[in-house]
Amino acid sequence: MTRFIATALFASFAIGSLPAIAQQPAPAAPPAQAANNQGRGRRPPAPVRDPHTEGYVTARELPDGAIPSPKEDGNFILGPTHPVAPEMTPSDSAPQGQIVNFTMESTDSKIYPGIMRGPAPGETPPPPPPGGGRVITSHAAPYTRKVSVYVPKQYVAGSVAPFIVGADGPDNALFTALDNLIAQKRIPVMIGISIGNGGGDAQGSERGLEYDTMSGLYAEFVETEVLPRVEKEANVKLTKDPDGRATMGISSSGAAALAMAWYRNDLYHRVLSYSGTFVNQQWPASPETPHGAWEFHASIIPNSSLKPIRIWMEVGDRDLLISNDGYHDWVVANENMAKVLAAKGYHYQYSFAKNAGHVDRDVKAQTLAEALEYVWQGYPINGKK
């Protein structure tokens, strides 16, 4: 049966056209823009935001091509060029980890049996609500998700290992970085888990339901349905210590990464986010969080006690902006996150990247190794802190 919600007037603009990052190829673009135009679909390019805008956080501007130290908290400005970090290239001197792949079917999930945006086949779409706006429709639909597990060469069979779990996978860039950083003893020997989403994007989709919902449900899905399969398929043992568990995501899955650590702080203490969707994408709507993930910086974090969370965040100067309702500016959302994290005394590092779009691949290639090293600060490496 189709499920639908008549949204408020602000939903009448094209939120639903936000593409599924890492699921659909970017549209054609001029060569100079193609690398940084991922994720914009048919929408016009976002305006370039100045990191020195009044009201933005005070940030240290680094020399072009430089990145912060992984031992520094605070706000930084990167770019405009973004050279690839050496740790992002496979090296003969670094032992290569094993990648184990498997799939998960929607029919096997008690938490996410599967939905798809739009009316069911043959069903007539409902009329618009009185006064205008948009009706978000959804119907039951199966999915198959891919899961990739990185097991480092240094992993000792039978030992309990820390891990990082990422969404919108598989993520080979992450696995390459882990190879090099583990070999250089800059991060602990850890398992890397990359989980694909259930498909689609935005309100009414399976991906949107998983990532944009403000609750610990996705963390519960990972804990009860994904991690047991990871241990079985890859023959590894994963730590139960939340300090030895990290989450990672891009766009909406970046917001999900924070939600995993926030709502299930008993499970996760470390968060890494690129272009985090700390905006109002939640569907169905919830009276507890009326503006979705925007509430993280508007009310939830400011009004809550300090949690043991360490977070790395990035946003691009040409990141997404949908200006109709005041709750869909990705740059402002991430700037606000930096403000409230600083005010509460969190350990965080925030990078504002110039000449960068949404989930910019060049910025990720420049910063991921440093971000991983930052996120894992304070955790023992080979028994030493």
Image (spheres, helix red, strand yellow):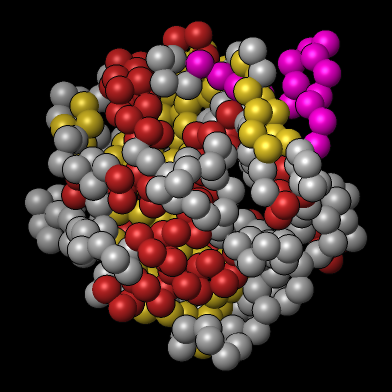
> Which is nearer the eye, 176 or 334?
334
- Residue 345 in view of the camera: yes
> Which is nearer the eye, 138 or 63?
138
Task: Say whether residue 295 is left or right of residue 304.
Answer: right
Is 24 situated above or below 250?
above
Is 3 situated above or below 84?
above
Task: Say whether residue 78 is left or right of residue 4.
Answer: left
Task: Say whether residue 178 is left or right of residue 41.
Answer: left
Residue 32 on image: x %, y %: 84, 66
| Predominant secondary structure, magenta span | loop
Q: What residue is shown at x 21% (from left), y 27% (from top)?
A: 237
Question: Quadrant of the image for the N terminus?
Answer: top right
> Which is nearer the eye, 130 or 70?
130
Is 217 situated above or below 45?
above
Residue at far front of view: 130
Residue 46 on image: x %, y %: 76, 67
- Residue 249 in view of the camera: no
Question: Quadrant of the image for the C terminus?
Answer: bottom left
Residue 102 on image: x %, y %: 47, 18
Q: What residue is shown at x 52% (from left), y 83% (from top)?
A: 56
Residue at far left of view: 383
Find out whether residue 345 is within the magenta segment: no
Task: Say whether residue 116 is left or right of residue 180.
Answer: right
Residue 372 on image: x %, y %: 37, 57
Is 45 situated above or below 60?
above
Which region of the structure is painted magenta?
Answer: 113-128
Q: What residue is shown at x 78% (from left), y 41% (from top)?
A: 130
Q: What residue is shown at x 74% (from left), y 26% (from top)?
A: 118
